[in-house]
Amino acid sequence: MPVTFIQILGKKLILQLKAFFLTMQEFFLFSVRAFMSFPKIIRYWRDALDQAAICGTDSIPIVLVSAISIGALLAIEVGNLLEDFGAKTMLGRSTALTVIRELGPLLMGLMLSARFGSRNGAELGAMQISEQIDALRAFGTDPIAKLVMPRLVAALIMFLPLTALSDFAGLQSAAYMAEHYHRIDPGIFWNAVYPRLVAKDFVVGFLKAPVFAVIITLVSCFNGFSARGGTAGVGRSTIKGIVVSSGLVLIANFYVSKIVLENM
Amino acid sequence: MIELRKVGLKYGDREILKNVSLTVQDNTIKAILGPSGVGKSTILKLMLGLIKPNNGQILVDGTDITGMKETSLYDIRRKMGMVFQGNALFDSLTISQNLGFFLRENMKLPEKEISQRVAEQIQFAGLEGYEDQLPESLSGGMRRRVAIGRALIFKPHMILFDEPTAGLDPVSSKKILSLISSLRHHNNLGAVIVTHIIDDVFNVADSVAVLYQGEIIFDDVTEKLHDAEHPFIRSILSDKILEL
C-alpha cells in the first residue's frame, strides 16, 4: 500500500515537473517572439501609445499615493530611530538612499504589477477564451506583435519616468514629514540628500525600471494568452500573472541591488 | 482545395482524430457532421494551421502546411476566411471597424477601398444603420452576419464555418443558411461547415463527412447520406440534432 502511494506521488511529481518545464519553455519562446517583433513597432506605434497612456499616465495616481505614504512613514520611523542615536540630521541621507535605490522603484513595480499586469491578464485572457486571439491568427495577424510587443515597448518607456516620479514624491513627502513631524530644517534635510547622492544610487534604482517592465508585461501577457476554462479561467490566469510577476519583481529587486552595489 | 491526409491528433492520452482523410474542393460546400466534442472544430483549426497534428498531412492548394512556421502560415490563412462559433468579434470595436480591421491590418489598401469593401459587406449582411454600434448591442444572428462579413471581406477562396447556426433562433438560422448558400452562387467560394444540426447539412452542403469517435465514417455527396447504413448515421437521421 505505501509503495503504491509513493509510486502515485512520484508519478504526480514527475507530471508536475514536466508541466513546469513545458510552461517555462513556452514562456521563453513567447518572450523571444515578443522581443523579435520589436521592428514591427513602426506598424503598431498607435497601440504602443495607447498602452503608454494606460500603464503611464493612468498609473500616476496610484504611484503617487503609494510613494507619498511610504515616504512619509519612512521619515517618521527612521527619524525616530535616528533620534535615539542623536543623528536626526542624517534623515535626508538615509531616506534618499532607501527611496531612490529601493522603495521608489519597488513600490512602482508592485503597483504596476497589480494595475497594468492585472489589466493585461484579464484583457488578453478574455480575448483568448472568446477566440479573438485565434481570430487574429486565423486572419494573418501575429497576436504577439499586435498585443504583447506594444505593451512591452510602452512599459519599457513609461516605467522610467514613473520610477522618477515615485522617487520624487517619496522624497518630497519624507521632507515634509521631516520638517513638520521631526522639526528638521528643510535646508538640513536636503543638504543631506543632494551632495551625497552618487551615480551608483541612481543606477541601482533606475536599472530596476526596465527589468520590472519586462517581468510584469511578459508574465501577465503570457498568463492572459494561456487562459483556459471560461471566465473562471480568466480569473485564475489574472491572479497567477499578478502573483508570479509580484514575486519576480521582489526577487529581481534584490538581485539588481546586489549586482550593481557589488560591481560599481 | 484543402486536403487532410491520415491526420491524427491527441490531447494528452485522449485521441481526438484517428487517421482522418478528407478533401474540400473549390466552389463546393462541404459539411462536417458529428456530435458535440468529437473534434469537428479541431478539424477547422487544423486546416488553418492554428494547431498542429500529431501525424498526417494537411495541404492547402497543394502546399503542405503541416510543419510550416507560424509566420509562413499567415499568407496561407489569408486565402481562407473563418467564422468562429462565438463569432470572435473584437468587442471594443464598432461593426465597421470589425469589418475593416484585417484589411487595415494586413493589406496595403487605400482607405477609400477599405471603406467601400466595408460598405459592401454591411449591405450584404443586411446591417445598414448598425455600422457604428458595438457587437454587444447586436442580436446573435446579426453578430454572426458581421462575423461572416469579416471573413468575406478578404475575398478568400475558402470560408470555414464553425457551427454557423448554433445558438440562433430558427429565423436567424434560416437567414444565415441562405447567406451561406448565396456565397456559392454570388462569390464562387468554397466552404466548410462544421455542424451538429443535420438539417443545416441538407440545406446547404454539396457533400458531407460524418465524424464519429475520431473517425470519418461517411464522406460522399449529401444525397447519399440517406442510403448510409452505419448505425450512428441511421440514428442521427431519425433524431435530426446530435446531442451526446
Image (cartoon, coloured by chain):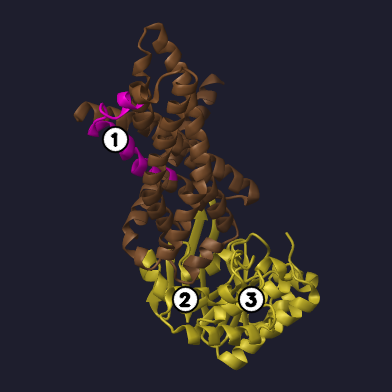
Chain colours: A brown, B yellow
Front label number (1 vs 2): 1
Q: Tell me the subunit letter for badge 1.
A: A
Q: Secondary structure at mark 1?
A: helix
Identify the magenta region: A190-216
Residue placed at 51% from the left, 22% from the top? Answer: A3
User: Disc 1 marks which amino acid?
Assistant: Phe
Residue A100 colored in magenta in the image: no
Q: Are marks 1 and 3 on the same chain?
A: no
Marked residue chain, label 2: B
Asked if labels 2 and 3 share a chain, the reply is: yes
Query: How far, Cα to Cα, is label 1 from label 3?
Result: 53 Å
Q: Please say if the residues under marks 1 and 3 sit with CB atoms less than 8 Å apart.
A: no
* Residue A209 painted magenta: yes
Question: In the rendered image, is residue B157 in sight?
Answer: no
Circle 3: residue type = Val
Q: Earlier in the sequence, mark 2 or mark 3?
A: 2
Q: Which mark is residue A23?
A: none
Q: Residue at x 46, y 17 (%)?
A: A182
The image quadrant that residue A129 belongs to is bottom right
Out of B239 and A25, give the one closest to the viewer: A25
- Left or right, A263 with respect to A224, comes to left
- From mark 1 to mark 2, how far is it between C-alphas? 43 Å
Residue picked out by circle 1: A202
